Image (cartoon, helix red, strand yellow):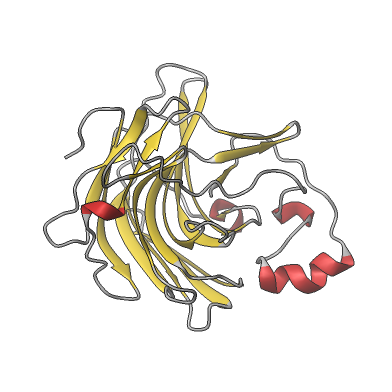
Amino acid sequence: MRRSSVAARAWRALSPVCIILGAVVLGGCGGSDSPSAGSGSTQGVGNSGAAASATESTNWAGYAITGTVGGFKQVSASWTVPGPDCSGGGAAASATWAGIGGLKVGDLTLIQAGTEQDCNNGSASYYAWWEGYPAASKDISTAGNYPVSPGDQISVTVSSSLLLFWDISIHDLSAGWTFTTTTPFLAAGESAEWIEEAPLEIGSSGSQQAALANFGQVFFSALTANSANPALSDDDRIDMVDTKGNIVASPSAPGSGGDSFSVCFGAGSCN
């Protein structure tokens, strides 16, 4: 689950146990890089039975494939950064990412990387990030000059050989920069995902899901899982729905090669 930086965050100090265990198990906890206790949990997805082939989620739209524990050690994708329609004013957000974990019931680990496209009082903002959930996301603009603009071509890879240390690469082909980092993170590795998300906002009053920004359409391509074509099928799709079960974002059918698809904002069909 993407934790948005739209809202100001509340943090707590590191404990000795967190210092010892957090760096390996969660990729860090407490301090200025992690949320305080009780600030939210992975929503993942849940099948409501309303559709024959699609899983429904209140915060994810896209595709995911599943396997056994330790089954996924690499995921990658490319996309064009969408430009959200912020003309309605107010605050809204959308996050575009590829990741491993957080899908199956009981799997509270999720390692992911992507871009975020936010609206605040009619203005749009953009940045790239990575996250080892449940630790807070890392806005990479704080680590150097990594500008993100609408229309940029982004390529993301998340990979590990032992499911304990993860290599994360974010490449902006349009702006000409590449960000890489290695982080300790113990992941179950039971699923691989390519998602457009309504992220979680962490604020001083707690956490809440952000309103989904009208991102229009995002095209995911060059998808891999374990360095191979994931061969997506319609059974792997996830529709985002509101609390009444109405579709608010949905993916297209997979491309003919099984390694591409689009996600569209709104209840209409996506092609």
Task: Report the quarter where the C terminus lies.
Answer: top left
Residue pictured at 64% horizontal, 34% vertical? 7
The number of numbered badges drawn on the structure is 0
Residue pictured at 19% horizontal, 53% vertical? 254
Please give left or right for residue 130 compared with residue 262 in the image: right
**Which residue of the protein is positioned furthest toward the top in this rendering?**
88
**Which residue of the protein is positioned furthest toward the bottom in this rendering?**
161
Q: Position of residue 134 (x, y in %)?
A: 64, 56
Tell me if I can see residue 119 in this picture. Answer: no
Residue pictured at 53% horizontal, 77% vertical? 163
Q: Position of residue 25 (x, y in %)?
A: 68, 70
Please give left or right for residue 174 compared with residue 185 in the image: left
Q: Nearer the viewer, residue 50 or 160?
A: 50
Q: Nearer the viewer, residue 21 or 166?
A: 21
Please give left or right for residue 253 compared with residue 172 in the image: left
Q: Say above or below: 202 vs 124.
A: below
Q: Position of residue 187 (x, y in %)?
A: 56, 70
Residue pictured at 53% horizontal, 48% vertical? 2
Tell me if I can see residue 243 in this picture. Answer: yes
Residue 117: image quadrant is: top left
Q: Say above or below: 7 vs 263.
A: above
